[in-house]
């Protein structure tokens, strides 16, 4: 019996180690390749021992345009996330507090949001592009920011609605009797109790915007391109400089990884305890 338990425990530990190595291996390859010389990076056989070089990072940042891409991605992600929460919170409040969650209008609006999130981006790409092209919003960050804000609103409605569904409607009714009005009730009564959910929504919307590729590829150009599009530009028919490509990948992934590590505890707390029971 003890032998059987030991074997079972060893198998579980082995599976965990294999899964960990499986997840870390691509990151190790990305970082190690970015630190190699062009010759070592192009080598058909793996080069395990080498002198780290940082020229690829400098070239990717300056010549490859990663500096401008980082600025563009940061601006688009922050603006779209903040505006998305600012617009999504009142909609979530409307469908949970002003209207009962089980009301017809609330159910239809929530269903509409769910349906919009299920539409593949490739299907909505053409309508967005033709609309923005007609008003001159292609080739710059404004059109992309609008699209990312649209998806941030959908995300905010779905997440914040789960928080506000558990919020006692009696509190809103008492605030209305005191003459606060809907907007003052929202900001003075609801918002202080869903800060955790709003922060978690901001983090998820930020990551969603940072990683988005399809709309950014079509709606931006030149110096207005985001990080994923700029990284894809290192691939060409004339050859790929693997050292610069992987260096650009590390530069693009590092800020969002650091951000996720820093806010992970606050995000978990917000998702777990943001609602009022």
Image: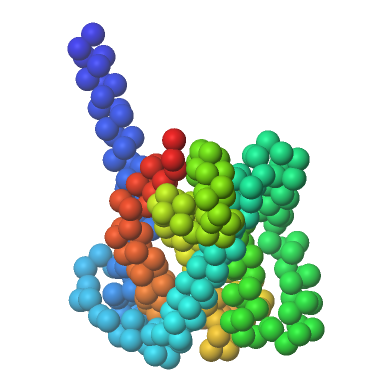
Query: The N terminus appears in which quarter of the rendering?
Result: top left
> What colour scheme does the image use?
rainbow
Can residue 46 be seen in this snapshot?
no
Query: Is residue 32 placed above or below 112 in the rendered structure?
Result: below
Q: Position of residue 44 (x, y in %)?
A: 39, 69
Residue 235 relative to residue 51: left or right: right
Residue at position x 64%, y 51% from top?
94
Residue 185 relative to residue 51: left or right: right
Residue at position x 53%, y 39% from top?
170
Can residue 148 be seen in this snapshot?
yes
Residue at position x 26%, y 21% from top?
7
Query: Is residue 66 placed above or below 165 in the rendered structure?
Result: below
Q: Position of residue 104 (x, y in %)?
A: 75, 40
User: Splitting the image into 4 quarters, where does residue 48 fall?
Assistant: bottom left
Residue 31 relative to residue 168: left or right: left
Q: Residue furthest front?
A: 178
| Nearer the observer, 136 or 159 | 159
Query: Is residue 94 placed above or below 215 in the rendered structure?
Result: above
């Amino acid at each position: 019996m003890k032998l059987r338990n030991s074997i079972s425990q060893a198998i579980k530990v082995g599976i965990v180690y294999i899964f960990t190595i499986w997840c870390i291996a691509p990151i190790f390859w990305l970082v190690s390749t970015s630190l190699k010389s062009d010759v070592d990076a192009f080598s058909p056989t793996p080069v395990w021992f080498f002198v780290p070089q940082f020229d690829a990072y400098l070239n990717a940042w300056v010549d490859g345009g990663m500096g401008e891409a980082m600025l563009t991605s940061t601006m688009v992600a922050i603006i779209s996330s903040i505006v998305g929460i600012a617009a999504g919170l009142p909609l979530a409040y409307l469908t949970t507090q002003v209207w009962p969650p089980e009301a017809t209008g609330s159910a239809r609006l929530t269903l509409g949001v769910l349906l919009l999130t299920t539409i593949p981006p490739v299907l909505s790409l053409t309508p967005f592009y033709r609309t923005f092209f007609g008003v001159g919003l292609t080739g710059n960050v404004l059109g992309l920011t609008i699209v990312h804000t649209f998806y941030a609103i959908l995300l905010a409605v779905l997440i914040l609605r789960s928080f506000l569904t558990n919020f006692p409607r009696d509190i809103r009714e008492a605030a209305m009797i005191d003459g606060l009005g809907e907007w003052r009730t929202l900001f003075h009564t609801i918002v202080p109790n869903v800060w955790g959910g709003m922060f978690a929504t901001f983090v998820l919307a930020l990551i969603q915007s940072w990683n988005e590729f399809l709309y950014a590829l079509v709606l931006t150009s030149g110096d207005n391109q985001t990080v994923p599009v700029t990284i894809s530009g290192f691939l060409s028919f004339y050859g790929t400089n693997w050292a610069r490509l992987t260096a650009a990948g590390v530069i693009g992934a590092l800020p969002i990884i650091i951000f996720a590590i820093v806010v992970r505890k606050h995000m978990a707390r917000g998702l777990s305890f943001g609602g009022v029971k």
